[in-house]
Image (spheres, rainbow, N blue to C red):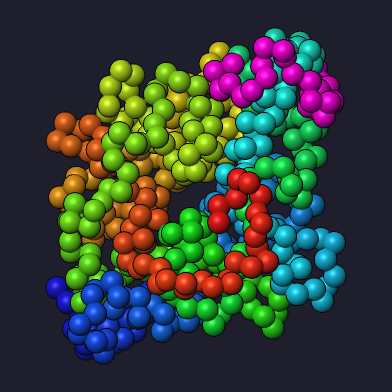
Amino acid sequence: MVMEESETPRSPEAKLGMQVEDLWDVQEPQLSPTDKLNACFESIPVSAFPHAPLSQVIEISSDTSLAEAVKLLARHKVLSAPVVDVKAPEDASWIDRYIGVVEFAGIVVWILHQSEKLEGSSAFDSAMNGSGDDIGPAVAAAAASGMSSPRFKSMHPDSPTATCGKFFETLTSSDFYKNTKVGDISGSFRWAPFLALQKANSFLTMLLLLSKYRMKSVPVVDLGEAKVDNIITQSAVIHMLEECAGLHWFESWGSKKLFELGLPLMKSSHIVKVYEDEPVLQAFKLMRQNGVGGVPVVASGGSKAVGNISIRDIQFLLMAPEIYNEYRSITAKNFVTTVRRYLEENQNKSPFLSGMVTCKKDDTLKEVITKLDSMKIHRIYVVDEDGNLEGVITLRDIISKLVHEPRGYFGDFFDGVLPLPANSRV
């Protein structure tokens, strides 16, 4: 049902949708629906996007410990945050003020790296065996010296260290973990550049960065204040779309079935997955290697998904490591069931408790958007009638179906950002 003109928009997002509707109505009739939307979004400045809740617009100082950064990201329910250079002068421009973005993806890489460096060190083996009262400095020394076992020249997620229930408690209690600063990882791990928009940039630019250019969030800077004014996430865009249900431009797109839009983009044979009896670190290693934000946990020997692990779930290995002590090996299944029990016992609301959220190919895009927005999740799995995986749809996939990049659109936009670290996103 199309929203009547006399109806009062329900939210700032719906008002924004009405602005798109007005622009949609005056576009040239010969334009395709996608070209129409491109023109509409190019006409709207990114400053028109509703502000994120203040609790989600956070900055992290470069001298913040990694341990505290994990807590901040988890507490504010965000995947990443801009990093402020504490050495920058007070009158620094925003380009000099921000040095990057710290995110759970980078923290995952750091954890994988530490599990490799600590494997086989005498101090760490002693801690794994339960001996030694003050293992922090010893583990730190072993890590700092890069000690590793000859049998462990590369990262093996199924190694005794990586799977042992004591590994994460030992790591997080070490001085090395407590004293590592956010700024310390900027040159070594997956370090996202601080790529920001100015208020005058267009909606289209923002949508393309969040889709084709794989950014999870886009900071918007206030030039006068030289600081971040807003942070627009993929989730916020999906919420805006959900609020636009009923508008003509949205219904012409959102009422289509998934298969009519070519979704899912990723077919079953290409889905990156982890089996329930594999070590949980294998899930995070796969995310890192394939540049994805989550993987399904699949029943051993089958194709039915029994759970989902997202990149942000690394927080549960770092903030409550004691819950895994009983496990000699933390498998993907152990991880899912233990975290779910921990959250329920502590009455913590989390997307993790949503479990496996699925849809069918003949569901409409609008139905999928509603599920993703209401459950605050970043991906939904497409299954057949028997529950077998047929594909996965991410927030990025949906946004990519909304707009396309005109030839030569960005020009020299990325100058000054490139060259980037090898593992960066853009």
Which quadrant: the C terminus? bottom right
**Name of the residue lying farthest toward the front:** 407
Secondary structure mostly taken by the magenta-highlighted segment of the chain: loop
* Residue drawn at the location 56% of the way across and 80% of the way down: 199
* Residue drawn at the location 41% of the way across and 28% of the way down: 274
Q: Is residue 56 magenta?
A: no
Asked if residue 305 lies left or right of residue 112, the reply is left
Residue 409, above or below 56: below
| Residue 295 x, y percent position in the rendering | 41, 36
| Residue 351 x, y percent position in the rendering | 42, 45
Which quadrant: the N terminus? bottom left
Task: Report if residue 115 is visible in the image.
Answer: yes
Residue 199, above or below 57: below
**Quadrant of the image occupied by residue 161:** top right
| Residue 322 x, y percent position in the rendering | 61, 26
Residue 326, above or below 61: above
Task: Report if residue 49 is visible in the image.
Answer: no
Query: What's drawn in magenta, residue-wise?
Result: 133-159
Q: Is residue 150 magenta?
A: yes
Asked if residue 315 lies left or right of residue 66, the reply is left
* Residue drawn at the location 42% of the way across and 71% of the way down: 407
| Residue 375 x, y percent position in the rendering | 35, 51
Residue 241, above or below 127: below
* Residue drawn at the location 65% of the way across and 54% of the way down: 420
Asked if residue 237 lies left or right of residue 22, the reply is right
